[in-house]
Each structure stands twice: as structure tokens, then as C-alpha cells.
Image: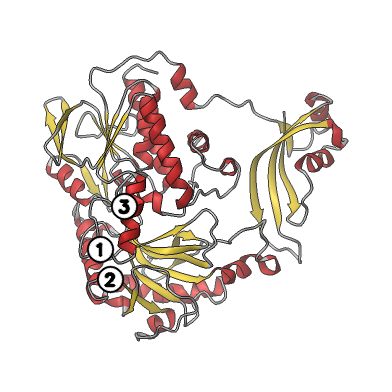
Amino acid sequence: MIRVSELAVPISDESPLEALAAERLSLSRGAVRRVSVVRRAVDARRRRGAPILFSYVLDVETEDGDARVLARFRRDRKVSAAPEKEPSVFARLAEEKSVALEKRPVVVGFGPAGMFAALALATAGCAPIVLERGQDVDARHAAVERFWSGGSFDSETNVQFGEGGAGTFSDGKLTARGGDPLQRDVLDAFVRAGAPEEILYLAKPHIGTDRLRGVVKNIRAEIARLGGEVRFGARADVLELGADGVRAIRLAGGERIETDAAFFAIGHSARDTYQMLYESGVAMEAKAFAVGVRIEHPQEMIDRAQYGEDAGNPRLGAADYALTFQDEVTGRGAYSFCMCPGGQVVAAASEAGRVVTNGMSLYARDSGAANAALLVQVRPEDFGGEVLGGVAFQREYEAAAFRIAGGDWRAPVQSVGDFLRGASGSMDFCIAPTYRPGVVPCRLEDCLPSFVTRTLRDALPAFDGKIRGFAAADVPMTGVEMRSSAPCRIVRDRETFASVSTPGLYPIGEGAGYAGGIMSASVDGLKAALAFLRQMGKI
């Protein structure tokens, strides 16, 4: 196979990839046997009126013999031999000799980290037991819809807790920094479970919350087929320790499960579990996180800002953005986070009496509304540096948001114009706020720290300089966004992934403080399981 890199194709050119590859390699169309897309990115940089481009990486198989073609392009750095594709980590695990462990490993939490830890353990024949405090994804979806429609709130099954974790009610982005090779194994597993094949090559892949529901069910079914077990409504309340480390986990209902390997994939919102681990003597530390608001714009405005006259082209889809700002005086940063094209702002509370927002998109990203978090950095010294001080910090402002908006799960909203002037009351927005159960005009400074509102007031004009109209007076902002990442970290060994204080405890994913998003959490859970299997001599 021949790898062709940086193949730039105008978005108006809908030629078959085989024809594009043949032209690039100076071959006849019939000389190209097969083409596969390795990567496709959008290049929207406009140089002197140049069109928006798709930038491809292609693997090409030719009829004439790849060696002869490569010899002709030996001085072209963008044409090379395609690397051999290695078997996936799951295929290698399945080929290893399966040896049952004396005690079944337990995975606490069935979000991305727990899901991929359990999938790896099950593939290796370890028959893991997965404990998920929330319900299965269908029951969970029904409970969340009832809540958003004005029904009762369930503190155990909500946007944060339940099958698939917080990522199930998100945009379903599958991007991560670093380019870890295990990312490909995660993407392959998602595709086998029903995700669209395009996630294997898009530069910014996403699944969407509607398709994620089916994907997580299929991964659960695969874990069960391989001998694992997933239990819902099973909250881990006690970590039982002995001289050698983990002995058992006791559930809220009193059941005791003996194990000497517990993978805690608890997510960033399991505050009661953080408290339990801290009181059990598990080594933890405070960490930085970020808080702020959700801002919404008409999607067509973002499309125009990013794509110009090509806005609305179905081949481009809904545009996104990423914005950063640094306060030169305080050194504190503000940035956009979890941008959801064509999505909605959602009620993401996990505790009674507190309002929390997040963003979500369906696969089609066709709601007509673009939303993103605008966040400001929070440092441990901002909340006293105590291990669980960040939890108390989050709770304080979430409770304030609940209170000032009327105490009925509606969220406080304020126009950018009112926010910048220090006024409130306007509801004449450029786009209707999408948060359900509804919004109430309030002063966001009454439910955010002063350093956050001060930084946002400086950042918004700067963002408007990058995207015209971003900080227009009639743009709505909904509060509060408090769950961008975990407010503390469970300290672990870099090589073994085990807790530095508690043998047999493997803290993983966002809740452990080592990931930030579906992809990085999935990879983290997979890596921890592989480290454990190596220690057990199973790989």
C-alpha cells in the first residue's frame, strides 16, 4: 500500500477518491485497485480567496505494483509506503491464553473509562463485575427526559450517572491530545459496536448522544458475552481494606463483593464516593479545574464566521470553534470548552437543590443552535487547597444558581449586553435559550466567583474580535457550568496505574483526575486494565 499525505481537494470537487489518487500518483484510473481514507480534515484557512479544502491522508493499492510507483516518488515526502497495520489490542488479548483469576476484578462506574477497562478485562477472560449506580441507558434516557420536561429529579440516574457516564449526554466528541496509538483501538471498538465508520478517519470525529445510546448497549452486550457482568442500581458505598490492600466492596444495599482489584471509574461528579475514598485513607490531592457559563449563538452565525460563503454546505456540516484568552494582569485564562455545534444546553445536576449546565448534540447536529462553555481557571488556592475543597466550591455556586433562578430547576440566564453592563432582566435574545426545564433572567455574578465574572468580562470582547458578533448584546449565557473536570485527583503510580496508598485500587478516567473527555477516559481505562493484566502475567 502507498500512503498519500496532505492531498488537498476543494470541497466542490466530488470526484471519486480513486480518481483523485490516480491523478496524484500519475496513474490511469484503472491502475488504482483500492483506496481507504486514513484521515480527512477541513482546511478553512482562506488565502487570497482560495477555496475551503479537504485535506486527506489516503492509503492506495495499485495494479502496477506499489514498489514501482514508490520508486518514482522517492523524493516526494508526501508519498511513502503505508505502515503495516497491527492487530488491535483486543485481538491480541483474545489470542492470549485465558486464565481465570482467583477473585473477579470489580469495575466501579460504567462510563468510558470503566467501559473500556471492563471490555479489556473481559476479553482477557477475567470475568469482571461492573457496578453502575445509575440505570441502563434506556431507563436513564427516560428519566432524564422526564426531568427536563419538568418531572422529578433522580439523584442516582441523571446526566452524570448511569450507563455510558456523562459522555452519553454530550456531543459525543472522540478527540484527544497526544495521539496515543490506543486511540485507534478505542475507535475500532466503537465502530464494531455500531458507531459510524467515519469516526476512524475524521479529524474531529463525534457520535452524538442519540447514536451513543446504542453503542454503549452493544459494548455492554459484548462484555457479557465474554463473561463479564454489568449491574445497574449498584452504588459502591464502602471500600473494605485490609493489610494487603483492597478486600471487598460493599454496596448501598448491603451486598459485599470480595475482590483484590477494584477499578474506580467514578466520573467527575461522584462526590459522595470521593468522600468515602478520602475517609478510607486513599491518597488524594486537590487539582485545578474551570467554571463558567454556557453561551449560545445561531449555528448559521458560527458557520458564516468559519466558512464564509461556503456556510451551509452539507459537505462541511455545522462549524465549531475554539477560543482562548489570557488575562495579562492576573495570569488567569478563559477559554471555550466542549463546543457543541447544532446542539443544546442541558440540565446536568446530580444533586438536589443545585443547577448545573452542560452541552449536548445529536449526531446530525441540526438543532440550529451552537453552544459552548466559557470557562475560567480555578486554582486550588482559590478554595483553600483542601483535598475536597473544590467539591465544596462547586456546590456553593451550583446552590446559588438554583436559588436565584427560583428553586425549581430552571437556570439563570443573562444577555451578554446585560452581563457587560452589570444589568439584568433582558430576555430579547438572538436565539432562544435551549436549556430545559427553562430559564430565568438573573445576574450571573450572583452565582459565580468574582474572579470568574471579571475574567469573562475581559475575555468576551477579545472573543468578539475573533468571531464577529460572538459578544453581541443579545447573545444569551446560561449558568452555571461547574463540571468541566474533576476537582481532585486520586494519586496513582504512573506505571502500574495503582493507587500509591492502597494496593488493589486502580483509579481511572475523569473521576480519578487523569482524563478529560470520552476518548482520553476510554484510553485511560484501557491502559489501566492492560497494566493490571501485565502484573497478573496474563499478557
Which quadrant: the N terminus? Answer: top right
* 399 w.r.t. 487: above or below: below
In this rendering, the label closer to the viewer, 2 or 3: 3
Front-most of residues 473 and 362: 362
Residue at 81 percent across and 41 percent down: it is 19
Residue picked out by circle 2: 449
Mark 1 / mark 2, whichever is N-terminal:
1
Give the CA separation, mark 2 to mark 3.
24 Å
Q: Residue at x 36, y 25 (%)?
A: 122
Q: Nearer the viewer, residue 513 or 116?
A: 116
Callout 3, which amino acid? Gln
Q: Is residue 247 above or below residue 470?
A: above
**Three-letter residue code for mark 2:** Pro
Q: Could you tell whether 538 is left or right of 19 in the image?
A: left
Q: Which residue is mark 1?
A: 382
Q: Earlier in the sequence, mark 3 or mark 1?
A: 3
Residue at the spot of label 3: 160
Q: Are marks 1 and 2 in contact (CB under 8 Å)?
A: yes
Quarter of the figure with the C terminus: top left
Tell me, yes or no, if residue 334 can be seen here.
no
Residue at the image position 39 percent from the left and 64 percent from the top = 375
Res 393 quadrant in image = bottom left
Residue 327 % position (x, y): 41, 69
Question: Can residue 99 be seen by looking at this rendering?
Answer: yes
Q: What SS does tag 2 mark?
A: loop
Location of residue 231 in the rendering, given as x and y in whole percent from the top left corner:
27, 36
Front position in the image: 316 or 54:
316
| Distance in Å between CA atoms under marks 1 and 2 | 10 Å
Residue 404 percent location from the top left of the image: 24, 76
